[in-house]
Image (spheres, rainbow, N blue to C red):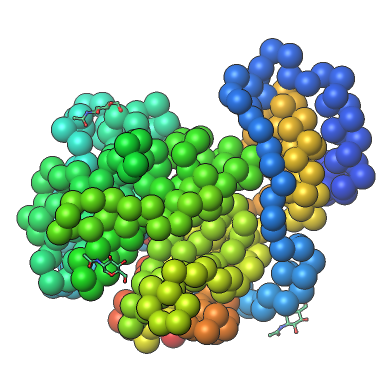
Amino acid sequence: MEKKGQHKDETFLQHPIFLFIVLLFGFVMTDPFQIGPVGGIEFRPVKHDIAPYKEVMASWPKDNRSRLGDGKLEFVNEVFGPESLEFDSLGRGPYTGLADGRVVRWMGEDIGWETFAIVTSNWSEKLCARGVDSTTSKQWKHEKWCGRPLGLRFNKESGDLYIADAYYGLLTVGPAGGLATPLATQVEGKQILFANDLDIHKNGSIFFTDTSKKYNRVNHFFILLEGEATGRLLRYDPPTKTTHVVLDGLAFPNGVQLSLDQTFLLFTETSKCRLMKYWLEGPRTGTTELVAHLPGFPDNVRINEKGQFWVAIDCCRTPAEEVLSHNPWMRSIYFRLPIKLSILARIMGMKMYTVISLFNEEGEILEVLEDRKGVVMKLVSEVREVQGKLWIGTVAHNHIATLPYP
Ligand SMILES: *[C@@H]1O[C@H](CO)[C@@H](O)[C@H](O)[C@H]1NC(C)=O
Ligand SMILES: *[C@@H]1O[C@H](CO)[C@@H](O)[C@H](O)[C@H]1NC(C)=O
Ligand SMILES: *[C@@H]1O[C@H](CO)[C@@H](O)[C@H](O)[C@H]1NC(C)=O
């Protein structure tokens, strides 16, 4: 009974007008005790430069059969927040980075999951690996210490694994695993605050994202709320051991993927709900262009054998969210209301479900798979297509989803 009433309220609250009244009310009682989500932090919303909600949703293909709902949840409560999934040159895996700071790998039914690498000598089993007590939601106090490996890629020739860790920057570890060696922790004399994903160029250079200069991973939600754009695409060159800024001023840069011929790379800008292209060769070298506006907030991009790109998208944008995104002053009040962030997000109609989408090199949408009811997955972070199967990672939950494909 109570649940039903609650649901009705939420739908009602999604009306921009009502939202406005809530905000006016907010003027009167703007979190004087700093217990709202942004209490105590310097929160300065800026205008999001984001494509109109209606336009994007109208042209976005729907998966009426909600085919992602047919996916299978595997390794439930064996892996905690497996964001990125990778396989080595022997086909072993998946390897994945967990909320407890470890990179683990699946060695088959007999052996199960084994620890492959850690990113810092700070890591200890006692502090970091507390089983279901070190999941993404519970690890916020410890991850700065234990590490949080997000992006994973093997160099297929050397067998070395490269890791983008949210706290320890860009690292690498040999084929036997162990303690990873830092490659890039600073750029232009300042600490890299939030390394997120990477890809390896055939010449050895590593392109990776640094999501924000202002907020770290635990506080990533503020990047979305504020609309701040201090993220970067960076490049590490092994011969000189130097790190360079390739692009600056990005809004939550997240996944990175080189194209098959390496003439360009794709990256996602999560706050702006879009997929971007950066040219590395040809007449447009050094320029950036839009590939697609997306219906929700994208995470990683991964290529398949045909050179097509899977994008993991957390859904979806809502009309109320759009009003807020165009009016920073509203956000500034709204998120100072002395109400928990999860409730504020729900009021905005941000029910979580999942969309994954396949693009070709020209940016055409080849496939859209949805799990509309959020049965199998609520937060996707990466899709890997390997030999007739999709492997789907999630930064927030404790499982990996799989789906036969095509
Ligand atoms: C899916 O449903 C929508 C609205 O219900 C409809 O407009 C669209 O044509 C359907 N798409 C397919 C592929 O069936
Ligand atoms: C241990 O963690 C602290 C806190 O994040 C950090 O400042 C320090 O550099 C870490 N030490 C090593 C060896 O990684
Ligand atoms: C590798 O190629 C990229 C893209 O053209 C370039 O930016 C980078 O400097 C190259 N790295 C090396 C080590 O030559």
Q: Quadrant of residue 330?
A: top right
Compared to residue 203, the image places residue 97 above or below, namely above
Write the residue at 48% across / 52% down: 248
Instruction: Farthest residue to the top: give it.
Output: 33
Write the residue at 49% across / 36% down: 215
Q: Quadrant of residue 328?
A: top right
Relative depth, front residue between 358 and 44: 44
Compared to residue 253, the image places residue 357 above or below, namely below
In the image, residue 161 lies at what x, y percent? 19, 58
Write the residue at 63% across / 77% down: 63
In the image, residue 22 lies at what x, y percent? 86, 33
Residue 87 visible in the shown view: yes
Whether residue 82 sits left or right of residue 38 in the image: it is left
Relative depth, front residue between 386 and 76: 386
Quadrant position of the N terminus in the picture: top right
Write the residue at 53% across / 53% down: 250
Whether residue 293 sits left or right of residue 134 in the image: it is right
Compared to residue 372, the image places residue 196 above or below, namely above
Relative depth, front residue between 337 and 13: 337
In the image, residue 243 lies at what x, y percent? 28, 51
Residue 73 visible in the shown view: no
Compared to residue 67, the image places residue 341 above or below, namely above
Q: Quadrant of residue 187?
A: top left
